[in-house]
Image (cartoon, coloured by chain):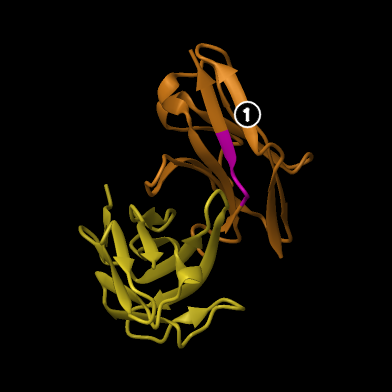
Chain colours: A yellow, B orange
Amino acid sequence: GAVVSQHPSWVICKSGTSVKIECRSLDFQATTMFWYRQFPKQSLMLMATSNEGSKATYEQGVEKDKFLINHASLTLSTLTVTSAHPEDSSFYICSASSSAVVLNTEAFFGQGTRLTVV
Amino acid sequence: AQSVTQLDSHVSVSEGTPVLLRCNYSSSYSPSLFWYVQHPNKGLQLLLKYTSAATLVKGINGFEAEFKKSETSFHLTKPSAHMSDAAEYFCVVSRTGFQKLVFGTGTRLLVSP
């Protein structure tokens, strides 16, 4: 099956620093990747959608300059939280989808990254 | 616009008894509907999906769901709960396939011995 690997699984950083989270599709080419944020005991909220080689499309209310998304290849997307603050602490999850016929009816999720800003 | 309402934030069952997790959806288009499960600090695993084929959908681990257009519902069921089923369950709707998934608020399933 299609596997999406997210790294790191957890990270602690100091306020004001930047953190990069990677999302890789291991055995398929991900034409589209999605980044979600999940607050404790709440649902997932879509932050942005990225297509390979294009600028990400951000959802309303998501700061583009704070959450930098890069989708430079068909197997890798990165989310960089810039100048992190404690309120950015959350669980971030990526998902990837493919235009390939056998894979295009499902999105495949990474295992998530728990970010704690101190 | 699309939305999903999960009617129960928590459901408690005893091991071996049936499970029912309720979900109602709203969609201006023919929806695709999914159920995902999330174990603590883990990513999401797809249980099953409805994409306009058979209305009774069978998924993994003995779960199934029935798409009822007249009731705009997509409830998740399992005949007999297992301790390992304890997790958070999300009902999800999208306009077409996997694009721009809209998540419900989740239902925490608690299974007691």
> Local crowd at mark 1 within 10 Å, few (<14), some, or many (≥20)?
some
**Going by the image, does A18 lie left or right of B62?**
left
For the view shown, which residue lies furthest in the right direction? B70
- Residue shown at 38%/86% (left/top)? A54
Classify residue B57 by image quadrant: top right
Which residues make up the magenta segment? B104-108
**Going by the image, does B9 lie left or right of A109?**
right
- Establish if B113 lies above or below B49: above
**Going by the image, does A99 lie left or right of A58?**
left
Point out residue A22 in the picture as x, y percentages from the top left corner. 27, 69
For the view shown, which residue lies furthest in the left direction? A27
Q: Secondary structure at mark 1?
A: strand
Point out residue A21 in the picture as x, y percentages from the top left corner. 30, 69
Point out residue B103 in the picture as x, y percentages from the top left corner. 58, 54
- Residue shown at 39%/70% (left/top)? A32
What residue sits right under mark 1 in the picture?
Answer: B11
Front-lying residue, A102 or A85: A85
- Quadrant in the picture for the C terminus of chain A: bottom left
**Going by the image, does B66 lie left or right of A75?**
right
- Residue shown at 41%/86% (left/top)? A55
Amino acid type of disc 1?
A: Val
- Establish if A56 lies above or below B14: below
